[in-house]
Image: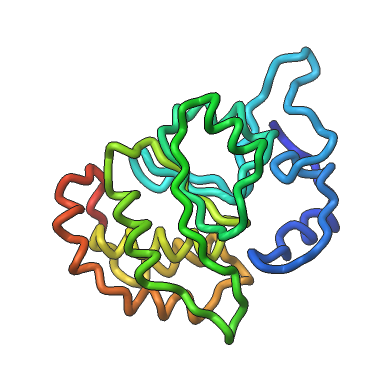
Amino acid sequence: MKLDMGNEKRREIESDDDDDDVVIDKSCYPSLGGELTATSRDGEELFVPPLNFAMVDNGIFRSGFPDTANFSFLQSLRLRSILCLCPEPYPEANNEFLRANGIRLFQFGIDGCKEPFVNIPEDTIREALKVVLDVRNHPLLIHCKRGKHRTGCLVGCLRKLQKWCLSSVFDEYQRFAAAKARVSDQRFMERFDVSSLKHLSTSFSGSQCS
């Protein structure tokens, strides 16, 4: 489904941060909610992915927070699990969707703080990675609020475990964070020690990139 947004609306969405309390005109972007329906002109249902949706690896996806407009798309992924990195209670509509589709929720709450007051809990990222590495949880969707910083850090640590070089890890992180990229996030990924998780990665079917 192609959304024709004006330049002003596009800038408004792109400037939104994981942690900014800004008001967005949701009617111009279905994955953020609003009155738009995910149907074509002939009444055919269309699949609308969540904001910043992408495939990470076989059976692993990433995105911003899914809304009701995204549920049909998520159904097409046949998810077994969703891993949420936000500390707030999961919305009831999302919980109902999980129950109806037999999807398990893993929640590892990380506060979405801004620099310089950033405290990324290494233990929490480590426990979340264990869920990601367990193929029994696949297909799995990782998400935070906008799919930029918290999700980016978790995926970046996964990439280190997959033996990606740091420049490639940072390039991927920056593609999603764009102008909101944080030096503290990249420093965290650089320093993150994956040695305690290497025994888990042997059963993980993901690609080993360099």
- Residue shown at the point (29%, 68%) measured from the top left: 165
- Residue shown at the point (79%, 60%) measured from the top left: 12
Q: Is residue 144 above or below residue 203?
A: below
Q: Is residue 6 above or below residue 140?
A: below
Q: Is residue 90 above or below residue 210?
A: above
**Residue 92, image x and y in percent?**
65, 39
Viewer-closest of 145 and 208: 145
Left or right, 184 with reference to 195:
right
**Residue 93, image x and y in percent?**
67, 36
- Residue shown at the point (38%, 64%) measured from the top left: 125
Number of marks in the rendered image: 0
Left or right, 41 with reference to 192:
right
Q: Quadrant of residue 196?
A: bottom left
Left or right, 17 with reference to 127:
right
- Residue shown at the point (33%, 50%) measured from the top left: 131
Left or right, 124 with reference to 50:
left
**Residue 164, image x and y in percent?**
28, 63
Query: If the image is split into quadrants, where does the N terminus sit?
Result: top right
Q: Quadrant of residue 40?
A: top right
Q: Is residue 111 above or below residue 36?
A: below
Q: Quadrant of residue 192?
A: bottom left
**Residue 97, image x and y in percent?**
59, 31
Viewer-closest of 112 and 87: 87
Query: If the image is split into quadrants, where does the C terminus sit?
Result: bottom left
User: How has the structure been colored for display?
Assistant: rainbow
